[in-house]
Amino acid sequence: MRDEKCQVCGGALVVPERGRRPRYCSRACQARAYRSRRAQPAPPAEQTTVAAQRRTQIARAVWRIAAEQGLEAVSLRAVAAEAGISVRVVQYHFGSKHQLLVDALTLLHETNQQNARDRIEADLTDPRALLSAILREFVPLDEQRRLSLRVLAAYYARSLTDPALAAVFLAGDRSLEEFVALILRQAADSGLLRAGVDPGSTADLLVAGVTGLGLDVVHGTRRSRDVLEIIARQLDQLFDDAARIPAKTATRR
């Protein structure tokens, strides 16, 4: 057997009969190695982009498994097979199964937010159209939104007993309700909202209601077009003389 040497100073190492083989002869050498790694330059932008793409590829595999089979079917081996890569690659990018679940949920939220920003034009001069566009994001009008709702439903039950997953769900807690309330308040200030409408409680009801309706569509108990009609009727009830508000779309085509 060849002599084991310290990776920093080249000195001889004392190798135990059992356990992990040491890499450094002392804590001082271990600290020097750590400082050396910290001082290394950041990887090129190309490597960072490739790593991000790989993480997204793996996360999408998690989403497909969770949507089709439930979160209990997600394992490192199953995700690797679904993504067409090795288990080692999955472990390299995420470490453990739990970290994979947490990061995949985080990436799903980020993807949903980006897709919504791409679809919605934030035009506060037409609050009714803007609210309609926001609420439509919770309706599975395409495969991406349908997949997202199924994955979030699979995650939700686990998040009730998993603080790390719950933290992802609660990261933007009430931010959407607050934004909807802001739109309603601006509509009220402009004289477009019916008298007596409370922006805060109405925003809570709108968001909670459309969330449940979207899940009904996923379950097959409602149709998407029926939910869109419900959204339109609800907005008609909120806005004063809705017929005189220009029918301006808030979505990009």
Image (spheres, rainbow, N blue to C red):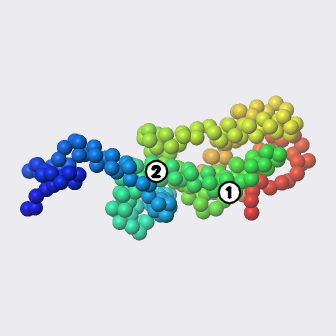
Q: Looking at the figure, which quarter contains the N terminus? A: bottom left
**On the image, numbered disc 2 is attached to which residue?**
103
Q: Is 138 left or right of 41, judged from the image as shown?
A: right
Q: Is 15 left or right of 69, judged from the image as shown?
A: left
Which numbered circle lies on residue 118? Answer: 1
Q: Is 69 left or right of 237, judged from the image as shown?
A: left
Horizontal and vertical percent position of residue 58: 45, 61
Q: Nearer the viewer, residue 64 or 126?
A: 126
Q: Nearer the viewer, residue 59 or 197?
A: 59
Name the residue rendered at 86%, 37% in the picture. Answer: 190
Q: Nearer the viewer, residue 207 or 129?
A: 129
Measured in 3D between alpha carbons, the distance from the residue under mark 1 to the one under mark 2, in whole angstroms, is: 22 Å
Element under label 2? helix
Q: Is 243 left or right of 78, judged from the image as shown?
A: right
Whether the residues at callouts 1 and 2 have beta carbons within 8 Å, the answer is: no
Q: In this view of the protein, can residue 3 be seen by the observer? A: yes
